[in-house]
Every structure is written in C-alpha cells, then in structure tokens.
Amino acid sequence: MNGIKIDTPATALPLSNGRGALQRSEGFNDTLKSAIGEVNQLQQAADGAAEKVVRGEIGIHEGMLAMSKADLSLRLMLQVRNKAMDAYREIMQMSV
C-alpha cells in the first residue's frame, strides 16, 4: 500500500549500533521530500485513474478510491505545512 509514513521523533535521532558508533538516520529534509514525492505519486495515480474511468478501463469505484487517497494525502500534507509555519512564526516571535 502506498501512503505517507509517519515516523516517531526517536527515528530522527542518530542511533547507536551497539558498538558505541552512531548511525545516521533519515533527516527531516529527506523525510519531507519523500512525503511530498509520495503525495505527487498519488496525485498522478488519481489523474490516471480518472482517465481510465472515462475510457471504461476501470470502474468508477476504483477511480474514486484513487482520488480519495490523493485528496486525503494532500490535505494531510497541507496540515503538516500549516503546523510547521505556525511553529516558525511562534519561534520568530520569541526572538523579538
């Protein structure tokens, strides 16, 4: 199943490999880029599904399911963006 993965904050921190050395895990920037890429893929899949519905290659239910997945992933991405912008504004107000 293709979807946005939500990682716990602990996975963003460097982890010990048991021998005292640190392993670098995926950073926030990489996580954000991959999430945006997944949203884009779902949007493209929804566009393709709409065309297939019009041509009669798939049923309306499959097309609506693809569109609903794309819509939900886009809404989630927008909410994450809004929260990040709110946090940024709050931090900027603290420095004044």
Image (tube, rainbow, N blue to C red):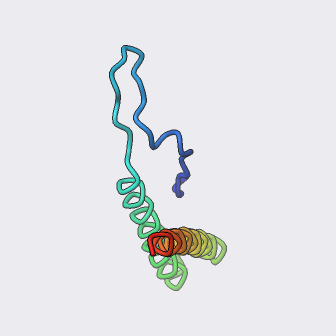
* Quarter occupied by residue 83: bottom right
The answer to whether 37 appears left or right of 7 in the picture is: left
Where does the C terminus fall, quadrant-wise?
Answer: bottom left
Q: Is residue 58 visible?
A: no
Q: Position of residue 71 (x, y in %)?
A: 58, 75
Q: Which residue is at the front of the view, 7 or 70?
A: 7
Which residue corresponds to the image point at 58% horizontal and 72% vertical from the top-left?
79
Name above or below for residue 4 compared with residue 80.
Answer: above
Q: Position of residue 59 (x, y in %)?
A: 62, 74
Q: Position of residue 5 (x, y in %)?
A: 53, 52
Most extreme residue toward the front, as rendered?
Answer: 96
Name above or below for residue 3 compared with residue 20.
Answer: below
Most extreme residue toward the right, as rendered?
Answer: 61
Name above or below for residue 12 compared with residue 95.
Answer: above
Q: Which residue is at the front of the view, 38 or 6?
A: 6
Q: Which residue is at the front of the view, 16 or 42?
A: 16
* Quarter occupied by residue 25: top left
Q: Which residue is at the front of the view, 72 or 51?
A: 72
* Quarter occupied by residue 15: top left
Q: Position of residue 33 (x, y in %)?
A: 37, 61
Which residue corresponds to the image point at 42% horizontal and 73% vertical from the top-left?
44
The answer to whether 47 appears left or right of 60 in the picture is: left
The answer to whether 9 appears left or right of 18 in the picture is: right
